[in-house]
Amino acid sequence: MNDRARRDQPLGLAHARVIHDDAGSRAPDYDDIYCSQADGLAESRHVFVDGNALIARFTALAAGDLFVIGETGFGAGRNVMLAWQLFAAHAPAGARLHIVSIEAHPLAAPDLACMTARWPALSSQAARIAALWPAPVAGTHRLHLDERVTLDLYFGDIEAGLADFTGTVNAWFLDGFAPARNPAMWSPVVCRAIAGHSAKAATLATYSAAGALREQLAAVGFICQRRPGHGAKKHCLAARYTGRPTPPEARELPWYSRVPAVPRAQRIAIIGAGIAGATAADALARRGFLVTVYDGQGIAHGASGNRDGVLNPRLAAEASPRTRFDLAALGYAGRWLADLDDTGTLWRRDGVLQLARGEAERRRQQGLAARLSLPATVLQACDRAEAAAYAGQPLAGDVQGGLFFPGAGTVDPSGLCRALFARHRIDPVIDNIEALTRGNAVSEPGWRLEGQSGAVYHADHVVLATAGAANYLCGDIAPQQAVAGQASVFTLTDAARAPACVVCDTGYITPAKAGRISVGATYDPRATELAVTEAGHADNGRRLADVLPETATQIEHAATVGRTRFRSVSHDRMPLVGGVPDIAAWREDYQDLARDARQTIARSGALWPGLSMSLAHGSNGLLRAPLAAEILASQLAGEPLPIAADLVAAIHPGRWWIRQIVKGRLAPRRGSA
C-alpha cells in the first residue's frame, strides 16, 4: 500500500460478525467456523504445537534466548494462549516468547469471552487477554501478557500486516478461514511475505494440506510434509524453511537502519532521569539489561516534574504517520499505565476533551472523526451540549463542540518516574554528564562518560534521554527547539466546579486533585531562562476563564504555585527515537539522493556504535515516551518492533539529515571522494 492510499484508509475497523450456537461459533461472512464444541485444544496442540515441535524447542532454549511465533488469523486466541501456557511450563527462566498475530476482523469483547469460555484450561490466559483487549483500530497493539511473553496483535489486512511487520519468525501458525472461503489469507503474496520474515530453519504448521498451498510454499523455500490430520480431517501440513533469511533492516529503506541488538550482559547508561529516561530504564530493565541512570539534577527535574501531565493525542484528518503514532502511543500508554498502577495513584483515566472554538473548527473536527472512523471507545465527536456534559461545567459561548478521548487522562509525572525507578531498584547517579567519548576498543571499550563531579563512568551502550541537552553531548542530532512553558496551580473555593475531564484548547485544564487544578502551559520559544512569573500565571488564568468561565469565578486567589520548564521539539513535531547517525558517513554514502531522491542506495545508514536516543517528545512526553522506550528496547533486544516500518522511519533520528541531503544542503565535506 502506497503512502497516499494508506493516509486515505479509515483507521477504525468493524468487529467480526459471529453467530454462537450449540455447535460452536461461526463467521457468516466466510461461512466457516471459528471453533466448535469439539476439543479445539487437542486440535491446536496436534496441528500447531506438534507441527512446530514447540515443546522440544521451548525446552532447548537458553536464558536470554528469544523465540518468535507468527500467526495469520488470531480469532479467539486459542493457539496463542496454548503456546503461552506451554512456554511457561517448559521454557527456562530468562527465555522470552514474542508472538505476532494478524487479524483482519477483531472480535468484540463479548464474543471473545463467549468463545474462550469453551477452554477452561486456558482461563487465566483468557482473562489476561480480555483485560488487555484493544479497540478495533488498524495497526499493531502491543500487549505484555506477562514478564516474559509479549503479544503484538495486528488488526488489519493480512498483506498490509506482513508488510508492516519488522521482525523475523521462528515458527508460523497459518490459521485463517479455509482457503476456498478466504483465499486472500493464503495467496502467493502472503506466502512470499512469510518466507521473507522467516528465520533460518523456521517451521510452519497449518490445518490445510491443499496442494496449491504446498506448491506456493515450496516455491518460496519451504519443504512441506503432510501429517495425519486431527479428528475427521485426513491431513494437516508441517513445513521447514530452507531459504536464506532476510534481515529485518533489508526490508526497509537502508538509511533508516535500526540499533543492533546487544547482549544482556552489556552495561547500558541512560543520561536523563525524566519521563524519557525513566520509561527507557523500565523497558530495558524488564528485558534483563543492566541499567544505570545519570542526571545532575535528580529525578524528574525538567517538565517531567510538573504536578500534572496529560495524555493528549493530536490527530490529523487522515491516517498520517503522526496520527497513527499517537493512536498507537495512546493505546500502549493506557495498557502500560493500568498494569503499573491499578489504584489511580499515578494515573487517572478522566478522558480528554479537545474543544472546537467556532463553526470552522467544529466542521474540521467532525470531518476528522468521520474520515478516521475510530470506535467510540477511542474517539467521539461531540456537539456543544455533549462537550459540556463531558466537561461537567458550562463552556465558553463560542465552543461549538469537541473531540473526546475516553481512554486518555492525567498522570503524575514525577510520581511515575519515581515508581519506575523503584520498580527496578534503580537509584540514579546524581551527576551531570559533561562529556561523552568513545573509549579505546581494547583497554577501555564502549563509552566514557565524564561527570561534572570529576568522576568517570563507563558503559557499553548509552541512551540519550536529556531533551535539548543531548545536542551538547553529541553533535549528530537533528536540531531541536527548546520551548519554555509555565504551568500554574489554582485552588478552587468549590472543588465541584472543577472540570470532570481534561479540557484542552490553547492549553489544558485538569480535573481537581486535593481541591486544586493545573492550568497550562504558556508557550515561549524565545525564552532563555526558566522563571515562574506573574505574567505567566495571569496568562494561564485567562486561559481558564476563556474556556470555563464559571470555574474561573471559583478561584480562591491568584496562583502562587507554578513551574516553568523547557520542552524540546523536532522540526516536524515527531520524536527522535533510535540510533544516532554518523553524519560524516551519511554525507558520503547518500550524496546521490540530491540528484535523484527516489533511488534506493543499498547501503545501511551508519550509526555511532553503542549510542541511541529517545528525544524531542515536546509536550507529549507522557503520551509518546512509553511507546518510544518500548521501540528502543525492542531494537536493543533484537525483538520485533511494536510499530509499522514506515512509523519507524517517521521517528528515526536520521530523517532530518536525509531531507537535508535530498535538498542539497548537506554535501560531502570538501576533499571527500
Image: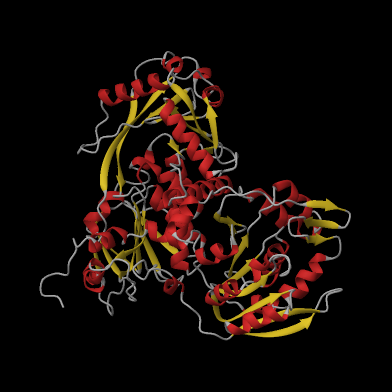
> In the figure, 232 relative to 113: above or below?
below
Image height of 243 relative to 291, above or below = below
- The image shows a total of numbered marks equal to 0
Q: Is residue 640 visible?
A: no
Give the left or right position of residue 152, taking residue 51 as reference: left
Query: Residue 53 placed where, x, y %?
Result: 69, 79
In the image, what residue occupies the spot 55% across and 66% down? 162
> 85 or 644, which is in the foreground?
644
Image position, residue 194 (x, y; %)? 57, 74
Quarter holding residue 344? top right
- Asked whether, in this view, residue 582 is left or right of residue 635, the answer is left
Q: Position of residue 637 (x, y in %)?
A: 47, 68
Question: In the rendered view, would you say 214 is above or below 368?
Answer: below
**Residue lying farthest right?**
22
Residue 568 x/y as whole percent: 30, 46
Specify the quadrant that holds the C terminus: bottom left
* Residue 515 vertical placement versus 69 (above, below): above
Q: Residue drawn 49% across and 58% down?
A: 643
Residue at horizontal 70 percent and vertical 47 percent from the top: 109
* Residue closest to the eye, 426 or 223: 223
